[in-house]
Amino acid sequence: MKRSRTAEGGAPRLAEGVGRLGTESAFAVLARARELERLGRSIVHLEIGEPDFPTPEHVATAGIAAIRRGETGYTPSAGLAEFREVIATELAQSREIEVAAGRVLVANGAKLLLFLTILAVCDPGDEVIYPDPGFPIYESAIRWARGLPVPLPLREELDHSFSLEDLSDRLGTRTKLVIINSPNNPTGGVVPAEDLPAIAELIRGSSAWVLSDEVYRRIAYDGDAPSIASVPGMIERTVLLDGLSKTYAMTGWRCGYAAVPEPLVDPLTRLITNSVSCVPAFVQAAGVAALTGPQDCVTAMVDEFRHRRDLVIGGLNALPGVSCRSPRGAFYAFPDVSEVRIPSQRLADRLLEEAGVALLAGQGFGAHGDSHLRISYANSRAQLDLALDRIRSFLSG
């Protein structure tokens, strides 16, 4: 039968899957904060997870030099061979593991590799365990892939790590992937090194892959944050995710990388080809300079974050109705505001609109983040002092 060329009436519709995509509240709050600033309001920005440091000069210079050499065309979807070799060497040294350059993939931000890993391993109905509170895109990507999100609570009494019992209770025959984020966004929690062998043993008893999100690894205050990929045998089932954005203040350069198990190399490479094609050559040249060049810029940034952490945690714990554990990594504080008697989302909204302090409600990071706020202390000490003064005045008013 000949198909009619006449369209049926009615408005065009979106795909059903769009409704399963979540978002990051940080960008919505940032937009509102910018709007208030345009209206003449003074706003202290504690909402966005972005280092307030410039990209190191030697890194920027390498990227600019590559542009001037004409390195502005397509590159292999998996990444340039030189950059992949440099990454493999860095991962081997920092995690004490053996990683072949052929198992390293480069993409336009660690977030893309996170998303594509979930798409590559998750069929409809598969379960994915992820930290709660945690990075909102974990749950969003799981739902987009029609997987079943299984939140793994991060316990405040465990310094925002998870218990072995909670993990064991959630692992099952339908578990396809376990996501670990250490240091964690939004809590700054770090999985203790002594827990990793037992965690690995539990996961080896399942058929699950592991995605270890380590983008904040270098921003740690009590030594390096340990990696589950360093436990013998785990690198064979672990996607070890890292990137340049946080460590080298390169958020806008959009460059992440991962060491992946051999069976995932081709699927992830094809997903990169089908979505973004490749990472620009000049960005990868900057990445080589970042990983092989002087690291004093990283040391100085982490030292400054440590000072800011201590300032913020001390100030928060002096506020009425507020208590906050000291984070072991990243650049976030996650204060408990349950005693303030204002729901955390309402409190965050009022602090922005009435006090001029932009921060995030913890519930945007999962159900276990309720009654908390997330504060990014990636801002100057003067601005942090101002924010604490404004919050104190608001709570005392």
Image: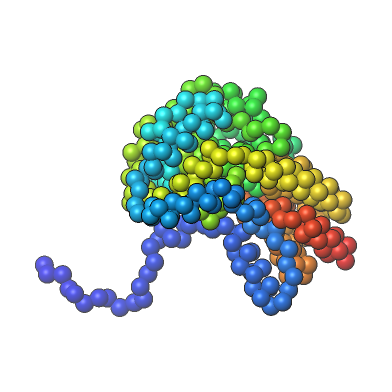
Asked where in the image residue 361 lies, by quadrant, the reply is: bottom right
Quarter of the image with the N terminus in it: bottom left
Q: Is residue 52 left or right of residue 157?
A: left
Q: How is the image coloured?
A: rainbow
Asked if residue 141 is positioned above or below residue 288 in the image, the reply reads: below
Q: Residue at x 65, y 48 (%)?
A: 186
Q: Is residue 295 left or right of residue 173?
A: right
Q: Position of residue 94 (x, y in %)?
A: 56, 30
Asked if residue 201 is positioned above or below residue 284 in the image, the reply reads: above
Q: Residue at x 43, y 60 (%)?
A: 18
Q: Nearer the viewer, residue 142 or 275?
A: 275
Q: Position of residue 272 (x, y in %)?
A: 37, 48
Q: Is residue 128 left or right of residue 160?
A: left
Q: Nearer the viewer, residue 315 or 201?
A: 315
Quarter of the image with the C terminus in it: bottom right
Q: Position of residue 184 (x, y in %)?
A: 63, 42
Q: Residue at x 45, y 28 (%)?
A: 99
Asked if residue 347 is positioned above or below residue 202 in the image, the reply reads: below
Q: Nearer the viewer, residue 127 or 290?
A: 290
